[in-house]
Amino acid sequence: MRVALIHDWLTGYRGGEKALDALCEVFPSADLFTLFHAPGSTSPTIEQRRITASPLQRLPAATRRYREYLPLFPWAVEQFNLDAYDLVVSTSHCAAKSVVVPGRTRHICYCLTPMRYAWDQFEAYFGAERVGRVPSRLLRPVMAWLARWDRDTAHRVHRYVAISQYVARRIRAYYNRESTLVFPPVDTEFYTPAAVPVSPHFLIVSALVPYKRVDLAMQAAHQAGVALTVVGDGPERPALESLARGAVQLAGRQTDEAIRDLYRHSAATILPGEEDFGIVPVEAQACGRPVVALARGGALDTVVPGVTGVLVDAPDAGALADGYRRILAQAWDPTAIRAHAERFSRAAFLNGIRRTTDEVMAAPPGTTW
């Protein structure tokens, strides 16, 4: 069986790329197609594949400024020639799910989310405060067109696989399709508990972008009078500098080993924004430490209130500050927290994808779910 893997773009190693890395284990001979590829930016497992980038790769500064070419993505993703493949597996949060496959070829989409900026988070990405009033006004009809294209090409997938219950609801709402739930892989063999002292210190590991709401977590730390370390980088860093004072600090990018050490020593890891899944809270729990998370999105799948962490109802600094205090007021069982995290292991992901693939390939041609 010849298999093609389709990924939106390969310019870093984040949650989507971790899922792709695991898919490379399920399909060891698969070829890989992507809109953009920055060589060396992802894992060795991915980089060793035969990677075909779209024609957009040849545009100026493509791998650094790829988001500026967003209106061209629908055209580019339809240029891939997939005639030689029996199965196509896309990992998609943007355009990858809309590839065109031959009639005999099956297409499974591991859906990270329907594209947020086109459907329901335009203001967070392209609002006037983000890009300026005139660019925002010009981009609005473009994103509306992109949402229509995203909806109209949803039928190109034979089976959707969602990363969380939250994403399954988005697939149902925007694509009018049902989906199978397979949680993303978390490296529970690397992220493990350790017999180390825990300090009354809190942690965020996040890209510094608006919807992550790192600003709320920093404000909450000041309100609660606790220490907070923010690991990560991104376009919001200059705006967050004013909140980084006293015991609230920006630490920039860190190695995986350093992050694991921070997980183990911290009172809790914070997830202040609404995430489609959120791998960071599960990594922290794999290290035996609790989480404070907004009670929305993927956190409802990954956090057990009172057992593995605290869920807060409101996306504001006061609610998060109360969550910090609740963490410090309770004794937490690292063994129970770790046991819960093991539900999201790489092995569980591999089993779920293999089972789904077997079902799709055994069904009559053209079957959709």
Image: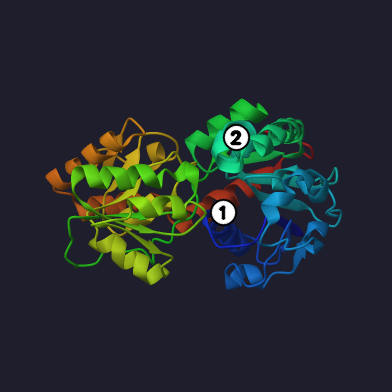
| Residue 121 seen in render | no
Q: Is residue 52 left or right of residue 8?
A: right
What color scheme is it? rainbow
Residue placed at 47% from the left, 59% from the top?
Answer: 233
Residue 115: give x, y in percent of width and height. 63, 39
Query: From the image, which quarter does the N terminus lie in?
Result: bottom right
Could you tell me how far apart the alpha carbons at marks 1 and 2 are, in whole angstroms?
21 Å
The amino acid type of the residue labelled 2 equals Phe
| Residue shown at the point (70%, 64%) measured from the top left | 37
Residue 321 can be seen, yes or no: yes
For residue 40, which quarter of the picture?
Answer: bottom right
Q: Secondary structure at mark 1?
A: helix
Give how far across and how far down residue 62 sits, in percent.
Answer: 73, 61
User: What residue is disc 1 on?
Assistant: 16
170 vs 71, nearest the viewer: 71
Q: Residue at x 17, y 55 (%)?
A: 200
Q: Nearer the viewer, mark 1 or mark 2?
A: 2
**Residue underneath mark 2:** 122
Q: In x, y percent, where is residue 198?
A: 18, 61
- Does residue 1 lie above or below 39 as drawn? above
Q: Residue at x 55, y 62 (%)?
A: 13
What amino acid is at disc 1?
A: Gly
**Label 2 neighbourhood size at 10 Å, few (<14), some (14-19), many (20+)?**
some
User: How far across and down, in percent of the image, does residue 345 sit?
Assistant: 43, 56
For residue 288, what is the image quadrant?
bottom left
